[in-house]
Image: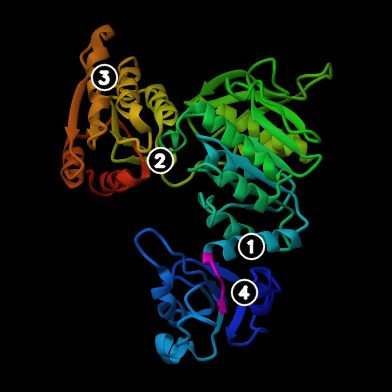
Amino acid sequence: MQNTTVRELAEACGGILLCGSGDMPVEHISLDSRTMAGNDLFVPLIGEKVDAHRFIPQALKNGAAVTLTSEHGPGKTDVLADEAGEIGFGKAWIGVEDTKLALQQIGRWYRKKLTLPLVGITGSVGKTTTKEMVAAALSGDRRVFKTLGSRNSQVGVPITITDIDKEDEIGVIELGMSEPGELTVIARMAQVETALITNIGVAHIEQLGSQENIFREKMTIQDGLKDGGVLLLNGDDLWLAGARAKEGCRTLYYGTGENCDYRAVDIHTEKGYPVFTALCGARGGKEARRVPVRLKVMGDHQILNGIAAMAVADIYGVPLEAAAEKLGGYAGMKGRQQIFHVNGVMVIDDSYNANPVSMKGAIDILAAVEDAGRRIAVLADMKELGPESAEFHRQTGAYLAGKPVDLLVTYGELARDIGAGALQAEGSRKEKIEVRHFGADEKEKMEIWLTEELRAGDCVLFKGSNSMRLGEAAEYVCQHHH
């Protein structure tokens, strides 16, 4: 936050300044009492298990300049000095009814102060990678702000918005959703000019009940789409191909089909990496502009992410050649198809998260690796898939059985069904697939086994839901394999 004071924040969220100076500058927002960047506002959230109000003294001690509180003030336990001790002296406290709601009000207030355009990205799969690739393409001739990591929730988005500064010329932010109504709250806060939906999958189907419900919820990104804005949709997705923007906004499609305004053609791979020609303005009788694109991230699904990035760049007038050059320099993020070479073994760390679509995409990448001695897939549980979870895991195993994978290592109780699905479907293979299972409490045992099992020439993929911490296993293998 720039040029922001405690008094302004109190007014923005309808709070009461209980103590401290209203003129004190505030530059950052923190939800973690242990981590302060300087002149921070600490927001103590009340969770199902922990009420972070108890960490206010720690936050102030670690450098927070001001804290929100819903537990102090008129009519409440007004004993600031007793709770914070000497560290509360000189600090500001803002009393509010609801700290989460107050944070969102601050996000909305700060968004109104900003004049730069924002691109909002949502979808069941690939939000973060698409966000990174869109930001890369836009950087062809813009200073770009982008969401840090995948900070895309009802509490992450307002913090993201307040991180934008006056030097930024355009922003690319990720908008997430895990429950009904959540995306509407976030979208109205973000007020984007371009809304991009990557796909409609089954992530969070446990909370939302059906793909149709997921589609309806994803389309609520338009609740914050400004008049005259653009709804940019994946034209290859069955749910999105027939969707239209709300009245007063334009609909554009990207993908590989002739229904798309931005189309990837001449698709092939070179040294395992996707290459295509971006056909821009491919509908409406206009002559399309053709730009070659070479990616540094593996997997056929990256082609859709790449053409989406080229579409956004064109919408904002970035020269297409410059956009393609910057896009071609993007080499991935930690835990998202990061490739390491360790003593003759190729490690693909795609462990950040997993769902049926992204799991199949990762298996495709493993299968496409050239000159591999053995292809080894280490696959962990996929979470939040609802009552059909076992079937989704078995389908993943059946899909893997149709690919040239030599060894399947499953980790976690849900992942056991991946192995069952692979063994059930292996009848069409010339060679039997080897399956090795490790329980949810056997991560260390699996790590040691892998370091002893791997040999020069092997290519090993790590993929699973983030809560399975499979990235730690990938890191262990990289550090200990000899």
Write down the residue under mark 2.
353
Q: Residue at x 70, y 49 (%)?
A: 191
Q: Residues within 10 Å of mark 2 (few under 14, many from 20)?
A: many
Tell which tag, 2 or 4, sits nearer the viewer: 4
Amino acid beneath label 4: Gly
Q: Residues within 10 Å of mark 3 (few under 14, many from 20)?
A: many
Write down the residue under mark 4.
15
Amino acid beneath label 3: Ala
Residue 316 higher or lower than 115, as above or below: above
The CA span between labels 4 and 3 is 57 Å
Counting residues from the start of the chain, the first of labels 3 and 2 encountered is 2
Q: Position of residue 394 (x, y in %)?
A: 30, 22
Tell which tag, 1 or 3, sits nearer the viewer: 1
Q: Residues within 10 Å of mark 1 (few under 14, many from 20)?
A: some
Stretch of the chain drawn in magenta: 94-99
The CA span between labels 1 and 3 is 49 Å
Tell which tag, 2 or 1, sits nearer the viewer: 1
Amino acid beneath label 1: Gln
Residue 197, by quadrant, is top right
- Residue contact between numbered discs 1 and 4, judged by CB atoms under 8 Å: no
